[in-house]
Amino acid sequence: MPPNRRRRTRRRRFPTTAILVTLVAAAALAWLLAAACGPKSSKNGSRSSATTATKTSATPATAISSATAPSPRPPATPESAGAFAPAPPTPEPTCAPEDMLRLVTKEIALPAEYMPADLVTVQPLDASPSAAIPLKLRREADESLHRMLEQARTGGLSIIVQSAFRGYQDQQQVYQEEVKTFGQAQADRESARAGHSEHQLGVAVDFSSKRLNYDLNDSFAATAEGKWLAQNAAQYGFVLSNPDGKEAITGYMYEPWHYRYIGSGPAQAVKESGITLNEWLLPRQVGCRPT
Ligand SMILES: [Zn+2]
């Protein structure tokens, strides 16, 4: 056999042997690894996520995690459910009726028994002398309202509050009167059903003026008072709830006299957004369900 052929054979045999040794070593290592963490690999590889979630929820680590940091989603693995995976921060809920950003619409109601705990009597200078019942607002809304109307008065305007907080029963009465007078279809365009009124929140205000004889009607928009409010109310935290031409969105006719307080920052953001208050509030509702 020629030397070159033997060398070639040896050269061929040596790599084959090396590969075999390497493969055997790798296989042994793989076997050892598989043996060391076999149950976990098998579980992750062969079971459905539901089965895995059921299985992992029974482990002590997950049970502690569930007890101390509830999460809307089941953990994917035992590791992600342990103490090393901090729970995401819980968003501030806006479902509570007293939240300043709580949305109330024809679809989203307030609890019938809800009445704000911090109602105060609207200051006499700001209240209409013809108001049927004592006018009340939540304290924060009233304080900002007073600053706003004082500022308006320095400009020679006389904006007054014609109606403010209305409880569930009062709203029921107002709505039924509207139905009697105008029929249900028209009443639903201009009056909220009980439990669906922003007035029940204690932060909604109907404005008028002496020159309108304290009436609430569309002509308020054309008065100096109506124009001043449209321009300046947002910096005091008040937003026009039912703007002109938005009935398809709000469900209510144009109400140039009806404003809702939500705070200065949010009110200016709503004004700049160009969308209605309802549209702006809707994605900011946390934990609320339509009722
Ligand atoms: Zn109103």
Image: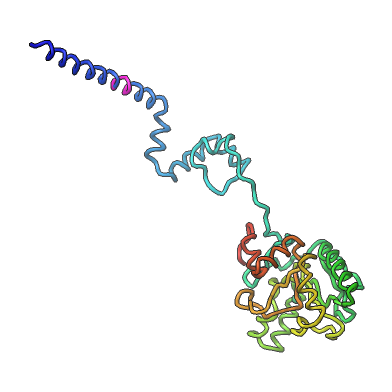
- Residue 36's quadrant in the figure? top left
Magenta stretch contains residue 275: no
Relative side of 185 to 161, left or right:
left
Residue sitting at x 26%, y 17%: 18
Q: Nearer the viewer, residue 152 or 81?
A: 152
Magenta stretch contains residue 25: yes
Q: Which residues are magenta?
A: 23-27
Residue sitting at x 71%, y 82%: 176
Relative side of 132 to 28, left or right:
right
- Residue 39's quadrant in the figure? top left
Residue 289 in the image, given as x and y percentages of width and height: 61, 62
Q: Nearer the viewer, residue 93 or 149?
A: 149
Q: How is the image coloured?
A: rainbow
Is residue 132 shown above or below 237?
Answer: below
Is residue 177 shown above or below 94?
Answer: below
Per the picture, the main secondary structure of the magenta-coloured stretch is: helix
Q: Pick the quarter of the image with the C terminus.
A: bottom right
Residue sitting at x 52%, y 35%: 79
Specify the quarter for ligand 1: bottom right
Pick out the residue farthest to the left. Answer: 1
Is residue 280 shown above or below 156?
Answer: above
Q: Pick the quarter of the image with the N terminus.
A: top left
Residue 34 in the image, given as x and y percentages of width and height: 37, 27
Q: Nearer the viewer, residue 56 or 89?
A: 89
- Residue 235's quadrant in the figure? bottom right
Q: How many marks?
A: 0
Residue 96 in the image, given as x and y percentages of width and height: 70, 59
Residue 4 in the image, given as x and y percentages of width and height: 13, 13
